[in-house]
Image: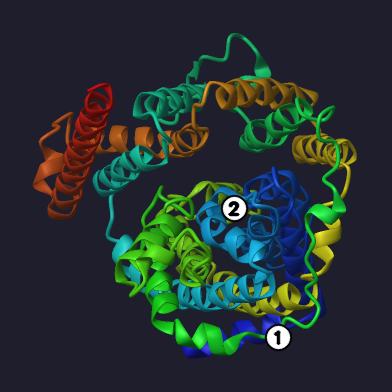
Amino acid sequence: MLEDLLAAAVVVFNWQTIAAISLGTIVGLMIGAIPGLSATMGMALLSPFTFFVGPLIGIPFLIGLFKGGTFGGSVSAILIGTPGTAANAATLLDGYEMRKQGKASEALMGALNASLVGDAFGTVALIFGAPALALIAIQFGPHEFFALVLFSLTMICYVSGRSLAKGVLAASLGVFFALIGTDPIGGTQRLSFGLPELQGGLNVIALVTGLFGIAEVLIQMESFGRTGKPAADSIGVRIAGTGMQLGAAATHLWTIVRSSLVGTFIGALPGIGSETSPWVAYGLAKRASKNPEKFGHGAFEGVVAPEAANNAVCAAAMIPMLVFGIPGDIVTAILMSALIAQGLQPGPFLISEHRDVIFGLFMSVLFATAALYIFGRLTMRWWIKVLTIPRPLLYSIVVAFCVVGTYSVKSSSFDLAVMFVFGIVGYAMRKLDIAIAPMLLSFVLAKILEESLRRGLIQSDGNLLAFFERPITAIILVLTALVLVTFGYLELRRRRRGKRGGNDETA
């Protein structure tokens, strides 16, 4: 394996790949630093442009964008109290308080150092965990894949926002849209309504670009007249002379390591992603702290814990995507589409059939970790100026990227129509407080779920009990049931507490 990594390092260490990683990281930092934009949107907008270059140039660009965007959201969270991405929402609690106390430099560099450590943990897990797990995944049949995807779908419970019912509704819509096109087993048309453009199903890039790009523009348009441009003096911070703050990071090294492990573990679980791990890490850091009362009032641990966790997710979330063909989160779902467009089908045989390319991507992930720290350190002061760009101009550019990116995939005007339709759908979901993540995850996973279920039933002559007769399948199904029961219990207990609190206030 070490020989493979060394050979891959030689292949990847060329100016094209290094330039792609560097450019992706810088673009990701910029996108993440701007409130309203995110790594997810950036991936959706720019992934079509990677289809025209080799996999060891296009995919490393997206990996750099993913990592840069994840950290970049902490810049606006700390400086102006608005998280650039959902993954940085927990960072805001103490980061913005530190900024108000004149400790913005310490908070930013602490977040960067923690992100570096978390990123390293996730990358090591990917490089050494994915090949080992692939040896096990090769033994998987349709029964095991059905159980694994079903388990992944239960994770929708954790990304449904404040309403599980709305999350289930969004997931159901995702399944419905995934059914449009051709039956994967029989080859017959379904839900295409006689439109030849729908025979191949909905273009995932058009769907994602609409849900995240166009929908966000529509949301931002509502406030253009009120807050077209943030005041430059409202940021009021100078990054020059921050120093590396290694002493402060070393003082809280165990918090950073623990949070990195949390992010790596959660990232490797399909469907949860970077929105959950920061809050788990933040809660553990607060529970383990000698001064928990400082959390929410400018605690340094409250910044480094979530930042280490959310960056650890970046590489770890690629493990289930590469090995099982099941995205670890929304961003890796888009990354999986980019891999497929490059002729690389994620799954158990991907590493064995394209060993040189995959190990090249592993080394790209490692190089992207270094690029994140280098460019994050060098360009920190730039993002303060980016935050002052008038939003009408900024989102006009976003719309242009949406149109060009979607059209360039298949040169289809129908895909543009799909993009705008789902932009309106995404806007309506945002206004109704319906989480978009369950819809996208179910859209991606539904096709795998259906095909594996039907193939399994064909192999077992329609006997459903065959799914429980296979040890791995039975274990995963039991775990699925336990997750559902546990979540149901916690949800019921939360509602009971809410009712008691309401009764106490009434009394």
Write down the quadrant of residue 451 in the picture: top left
Residue type indicated by callout 2: Leu
User: How many callouts does the rendering have?
Assistant: 2
Write down the quadrant of residue 490 in the picture: top left
Residue type indicated by callout 1: Gly
Query: Could you tell me residue 196's position as x and y percent?
Result: 66, 17
Q: Report the front residue among 46 and 34.
A: 34
Work out whether mark 1 precedes mark 2 in sequence or the reverse, and give the earlier one. 1
Write down the quadrant of residue 501 in the picture: top left
Q: Is residue 195 above or below residue 420?
A: above
Give the structural element (helix, strand or loop) at label 1.
Answer: loop
User: Which residue is label 2 attached to?
Assistant: 335
Q: Is residue 317 above or below residue 428?
A: below
Q: CA distance from mark 1 to mark 2?
A: 35 Å
Q: Report the front residue among 84 and 158.
A: 84
* Residue at 37% across, 27% down: 168
The outermost residue toward the top is: 193
- The N terminus lies in quadrant: bottom left
Query: Could you tell me residue 464's position as x and y percent?
Result: 14, 32
The outermost residue toward the front is: 507
Q: Badge 1: how crowded within 10 Å, few (<14), some, or many (20+)?
A: few
Q: Report the front residue among 273 and 220.
A: 220
User: Which residue is label 1 attached to?
Assistant: 243
* Residue at 67% across, 21% down: 424
**In the picture provided, is 88 more to the left or to the right than 472?**
right
